Image: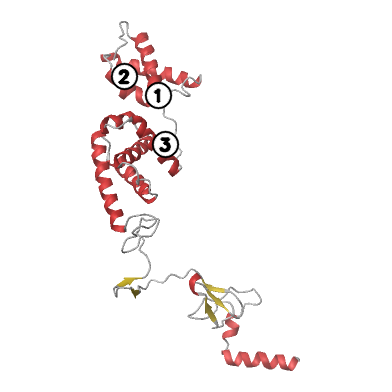
């Protein structure tokens, strides 16, 4: 038996030309050699079997997976029933999260082709820029809203809803993320849309994306939004500072919780103007 074993290893060593010494890793002292074309990195065998649909290649001698998730970059065409040639596979854009067929998906799950999707995104950006101009929002608000609008298109949130509602929800979400002084009623006045309709669309959009937006701070609206429209002249800054201190105290006493920011700001400004201005007016 010993003689047979010695002859076996001698024959294999002569046939492999010393390659077995370089690729054999039974001791575990060395790392497996780099895989050459069609050879196993563990045992050096060329008996590699491709599993086809999974894109994996397995060595039939030692069982190690040589390659997996192989991507084929070649373009293939097949002949259709009418004699026309069609490309095999689907196209995926650089910023896309799902694929779109080259000829559209008529009656499919998503209901529009790749070209239609691009037109929707382009027209949506133009509409976002128009609304942002009405609201005097900067370009970073437009970019953030367009990214949200792209996600809305990807998740089919725009289907069955008016485009203006979705765009207003995207812009208002970007305002909330940037902590700007714009409120939902501002978008309602600019677009002439019911504020409760916009609120419903915004809540559904936030739930779809799983966004966790911070609670609106009433102090954001006191100085530039409300106090600036009061006839306080040179005492406007003093009234605004007093109102901010009142809002901070109301927060510590849990008076702000469950109340609208506009009501909190109005109460704080009313008390602050009566305290600061000797002849303060309660009308705006």
State the SS at label 3.
helix
Q: Which residue is mark 2?
A: 227
Quarter in which the N terminus is drawn = bottom right
* Label 3: few (<14), some (14–19) or many (≥20) C-alpha neighbours in 10 Å: few
Q: Residue at x 26, y 52 (%)?
A: 119
x, y (%) of residue 74? 37, 73
Quadrant of the image occupied by residue 193: top left
**Is residue 269 placed above or below 148 in the rendered structure?**
above
Residue 181 visible: no
Q: Which residue is mark 3?
A: 203
Q: Nearest to the eye among marks 3 and 1: give it.
A: 3
x, y (%) of residue 233? 25, 14
Query: Position of 176 compared to 134: left or right?
Result: right
Q: Nearest to the eye among marks 2 and 3: give it.
A: 3
Q: Are marks 3 and 1 in contact (CB under 8 Å)?
A: no
Q: Earlier in the sequence, mark 3 or mark 1?
A: 3
Q: Which residue is mark 1?
A: 261
In 3D space, how far apart are the residues under numbered discs 2 and 3 (Cα atoms)? 29 Å
Query: Position of 44 compared to 183: left or right?
Result: right
Query: Position of 5 compared to 62: left or right?
Result: right
Question: Could you say which is closer to the camera, residue 170 or residue 277?
Answer: 170
């Amino acid at each position: 038996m010993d003689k047979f074993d010695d002859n076996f290893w001698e024959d294999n060593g002569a046939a492999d030309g010393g390659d077995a010494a370089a690729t054999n890793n039974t001791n575990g002292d060395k790392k497996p050699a780099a895989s050459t074309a069609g050879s196993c990195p563990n045992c050096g065998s060329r008996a590699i079997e491709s599993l086809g649909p999974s894109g994996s290649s397995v060595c039939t001698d030692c069982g190690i997976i040589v390659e997996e998730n192989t991507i084929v970059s070649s373009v293939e065409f097949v002949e259709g029933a009418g004699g026309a040639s069609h490309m095999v596979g689907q196209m995926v854009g650089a910023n896309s999260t799902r694929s779109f067929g080259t000829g559209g998906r008529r009656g499919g799950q998503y209901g529009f082709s790749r070209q239609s999707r691009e037109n929707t995104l382009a027209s949506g950006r133009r509409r976002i820029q128009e609304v942002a101009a009405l609201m005097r929002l900067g370009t970073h608000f437009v970019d953030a809203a367009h990214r949200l609008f792209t996600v809305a298109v990807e998740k089919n949130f725009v289907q069955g809803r008016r485009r203006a509602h979705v765009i207003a929800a995207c812009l208002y979400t970007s305002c909330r993320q940037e902590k700007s002084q714009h409120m939902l009623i501002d978008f309602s006045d600019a677009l002439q849309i019911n504020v409760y309709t916009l609120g419903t669309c915004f809540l559904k959009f936030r739930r779809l994306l799983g966004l966790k937006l911070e609670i609106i701070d009433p102090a954001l609206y006191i100085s530039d939004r409300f106090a600036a429209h009061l006839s306080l002249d040179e005492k406007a800054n003093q009234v605004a500072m007093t109102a901010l201190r009142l809002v901070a105290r109301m927060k510590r006493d849990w008076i702000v919780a469950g109340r609208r920011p506009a009501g909190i700001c109005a109460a704080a400004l009313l008390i602050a103007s009566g305290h600061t201005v000797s002849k303060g007016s309660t009308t705006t």
